Amino acid sequence: MKDNDITIWNITFDVDGKIYVLDEAKKGTRVANMIHFLLDNVSMNDIRPINEFDIKAILEHEGFKEVKE
């Protein structure tokens, strides 16, 4: 995998115990600028594969539990 194969999606935020996702569909906004910045600057050295710990943390997060209900 090469650095230029990286795409950005589902950037999540915890705000007061609730989970939010960055709205990547907003064009011409600070969000679009931030995604372009990340795409231009993130390399394979900056990321790692998701692991069991990450998945467990997401599934046990109180904000995720609200989504499931």
Image (tube, helix red, strand yellow):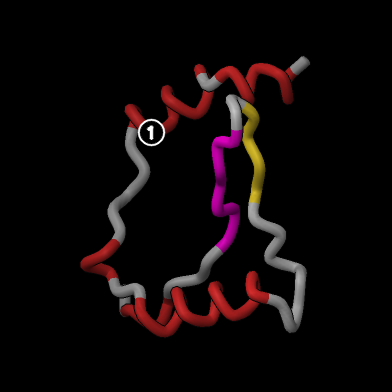
Magenta stretch, residue numbers: 9-15
Query: Which quadrant of the structure image shows residue 40?
Result: bottom left
The residue lying furthest to the left in this view is 45
Give the percent coordinates (x, y) of residue 39: 46, 78
Identify the residue shown where x is 50% and y is 17%: 60
Q: Which residue is mark 1?
A: 54
Figure check: 61 above or below 7? above
On the image, the x and y values in percent for residue 68 come to 72, 20
Amino acid marked by disc 1? Asp
At mark 1, the secondary structure is: helix
Is 50 positioned to the left or the right of 20 in the image? Answer: left
Q: Quadrant of residue 14?
A: top right
Q: Name the residue: 59% across, 53% down.
A: 10
Residue 10 belongs to magenta span: yes
Q: Is residue 1 left or right of residue 45?
A: right
Q: Give the position of the C terminus as an image quadrant.
A: top right
Q: Is residue 48 magenta?
A: no
Residue neighbourhood size for the residue with mark 1, other residues' Cα within 10 Å, grouped as few (<14), some (14–19), many (≥20): few
Q: 49 left or right of 33? A: left
